[in-house]
Image (cartoon, rainbow, N blue to C red):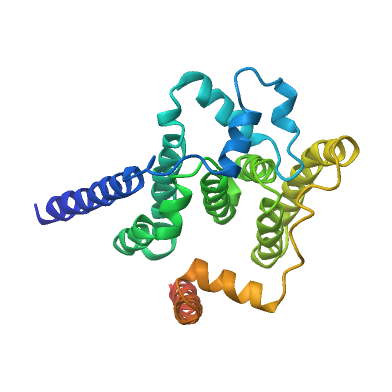
Amino acid sequence: TSERTIKLNHRCVFWLILILAFVLRCSQINSIPFWDDEMYVLVHCAKTAPLLDLFNDPGNPPLYFVLFKIYSLIVQNPEFYRFSSVILGIIFNICFYFYIKHFLGKNKALIGMFIPTISIVMIYFSQEIRCYMLLMILAVLNSIFLFKFDKNKIKYAILSILLLYTHFYGAFFVLYNFIFGLTLFKKGKKIKNFILSNIIAILSFLPILIYKKTSLTSNFNSWIKIPNFYDYQSAISVFSGSILFFIVFVIACIYLYKNLNKKQKNRTEINLSD
């Protein structure tokens, strides 16, 4: 009975957090008009726009444009266009819950899930017609399948491809996972399959790179200056809330990483003694 009560309470908290996430993301969602980047997406995904326009953005791969084109054909009321990102924001919270659960258990996963629920940055991205929430969903799923690579080789490769086709920053995430994977899978058939999955992902991305390089203009975003140290510092401050919060976050990550290593060593020692 007590176990059932605990499970029921856990589920209640889980759904309450999701409801809160939904309410916060829907709050004043259309209080301001579409801004430049959103209008850019709407123009490329317009019903009358040529299909090739979905591939003609020099700064972004086409996956999000294709998905939003389908969404806008189904939901034709502009009042609900931003709701597509609300849905993605909720899906991200669910994926993030399972990601934390894999490492720290379901109770701490609820805490981890609550943080992006109330994050101003996450709420903002969940109210914007841009690809960022889709990118984060794919990044979390890709990481989950990295740690469960044995039974999810194909899924990992597919998610890596989807990451690359969502945003060019996805290439950095695929690269980081590849470097981490090389330390995680050191020998045997597993490392060969892992390297092969990454090669397939890279080769699948070459056609869109070649198309953008040969067909599109090179003066896209030429107004953006090369970032300096202050720009990086400002970006960290904005996305973390402050430099102090960023330092606390880094310290917490190091602490969690050391604890996870200790637990892993203890489990290995127990298994050897058995």
> Left or right of 8: which side holds 235?
right
Q: Measuring 10% from the left and 56% from the top, which residue is drawn there?
A: 2
Name the residue located 60 percent from the left edge and 19 percent from the top edge: 47
Q: Position of residue 99 (x, y in %)?
A: 45, 55
Q: How many marks?
A: 0
Specify the quadrant of the image occupied by residue 19.
top left
Residue drawn 60% across and 51% down?
149
**Vertically, is 31 above or below 73?**
below
Going by the picture, which residue comes out furthest to the left? Answer: 1
Q: Work out which quarter of the rendered image holds the C terminus and state it.
A: bottom left
Q: Is residue 161 above or below residue 4?
A: above
Residue 174 locus on image (x, y percent): 68, 54
138 shown above or below 50: below
Residue 11 placement, left or right of 242? left
Q: Is residue 267 visible?
A: yes
Q: Position of residue 257 (x, y in %)?
A: 50, 76
Q: Nearer the viewer, residue 197 or 32?
A: 32
- Measuring from the top left, give residue 178's x and y in whole percent: 70, 59
Q: Is residue 64 visible?
A: no
**Which of 259/134 is in front?**
134
- Residue pushed farthest right? 214
Q: Residue furthest top?
A: 48
Tell me which corner region of the image, top left, top right, bottom left or bottom right, holds residue 146. Answer: bottom right
